[in-house]
Image (tube, helix red, strand yellow):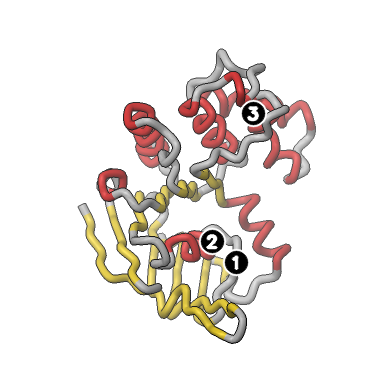
């Protein structure tokens, strides 16, 4: 079953009096449960593609469907509802709130979704334990290692039980050993049935995925499956 469908997708930005084609006719279908990596040099369109796939933006032209719903011309509120229900994000910079402890950081998406306080805490604790942080619930980000901070970010991405999890250079700020552990966690999430999409410039990281697409100049230049 297709969970993401792009047909003839273009995304154009205007900078001054110049138009820049960040994406130039993308056709892409992602099946539910896939492990996909998107690679390419800086300026290839990777981040723009992830923003569209993750319901952070809509295309200038073309068709974009997420979880069976056509979002090609969706409003900001429609995109936000889809993100809250179906999408989780893990970023290179963790994006944690420094004054909040582990549980409170993980709870944040549930607050935006209107989940009652008691249920929020129970679900956040469950997510923390799922990523191996059951003994760090009261710690703040400054009391954690980089790998532990990224595990908090992954738990936060999972707490709403999304069908799709995005990683945007999720090991970029980590040493190689810690990065391998985080990639192992993504592979475990994939094995549990999640659709995983990693955006990276590192071919070694991309090789962990079952399918790799390479972007160049806003187009899909190459695709490989393993």
Question: Looking at the image, is mark 2 or mark 3 earlier in the sequence?
Answer: 2
Question: Looking at the image, is mark 1 or mark 3 earlier in the sequence?
Answer: 1
Between residues 17 and 123, which one lies in front from this camera angle?
17
Instruction: Assess disc 1: are there few (<14), some (14-19) or many (≥20) residues with their C-alpha within 10 Å of its C-alpha.
Output: many
Q: Label for residue 51? A: 2
Q: Residue at x 50, y 30 (%)?
A: 151
The residue lying furthest to the top in this view is 135
The residue lying furthest to the bottom in this view is 17
Where is residue 198? Give x, y as percent.
40, 50
Which element type, helix, strand or loop, lies under badge 3? Answer: helix
Q: Is residue 3 above or below residue 86?
A: below
Disc 2 versus disc 3: distance between alpha carbons? 26 Å
Which element type, helix, strand or loop, lies under badge 1? Answer: loop
Between residues 219 and 62, which one lies in front from this camera angle?
219
Q: Which residue is mark 1?
A: 57
Where is residue 41? Give x, y as percent.
35, 61
Quadrant in which residue 190 is drawn: top left
Between residues 72 and 19, which one lies in front from this camera angle?
19
Give the total number of marks visible in the rendering: 3
Screen quadrant of the N terminus: bottom left
Q: Residue at x 78, y 43 (%)?
A: 114
Q: Residue at x 48, y 49 (%)?
A: 166
Disc 1 versus disc 3: distance between alpha carbons? 28 Å
Q: Is residue 189 left or right of residue 64?
A: left
Asked whether the beta carbons under mark 1 and mark 2 sit within 8 Å of each other, the answer is yes
Q: Which residue is mark 3?
A: 124
Where is residue 192? Give x, y as percent.
41, 37
């Amino acid at each position: 079953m297709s969970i993401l469908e792009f047909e003839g997708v273009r995304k154009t930005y205007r900078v001054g009096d110049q138009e820049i084609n960040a994406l130039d006719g993308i056709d892409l279908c992602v099946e539910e449960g896939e492990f996909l990596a998107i690679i390419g040099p800086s300026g290839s369109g990777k981040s723009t593609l992830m923003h569209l796939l993750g319901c952070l933006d809509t295309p200038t032209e073309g068709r974009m469907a997420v979880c069976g719903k056509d979002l090609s011309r969706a409003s900001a509120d429609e995109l936000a509802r889809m993100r809250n229900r179906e999408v989780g994000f893990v970023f290179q910079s963790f994006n944690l709130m420094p004054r909040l402890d582990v549980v409170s950081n993980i709870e944040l998406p549930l607050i935006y979704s209107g989940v009652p306080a008691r249920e929020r805490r129970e679900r956040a604790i469950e997510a923390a334990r799922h990523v191996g942080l059951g003994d760090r619930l009261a710690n703040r980000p400054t009391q954690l290692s980089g790998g532990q901070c990224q595990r908090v970010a992954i738990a936060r991405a999972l707490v709403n039980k999304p069908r799709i999890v995005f990683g945007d250079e999720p090991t970029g700020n980590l040493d190689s050993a810690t990065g391998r552990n985080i990639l192992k966690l993504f592979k475990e999430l994939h094995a549990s049935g999640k659709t995983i999409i990693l955006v990276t410039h590192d071919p070694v990281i991309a090789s962990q995925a079952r399918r790799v697409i390479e972007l160049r100049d806003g187009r899909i230049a190459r695709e490989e499956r393993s």
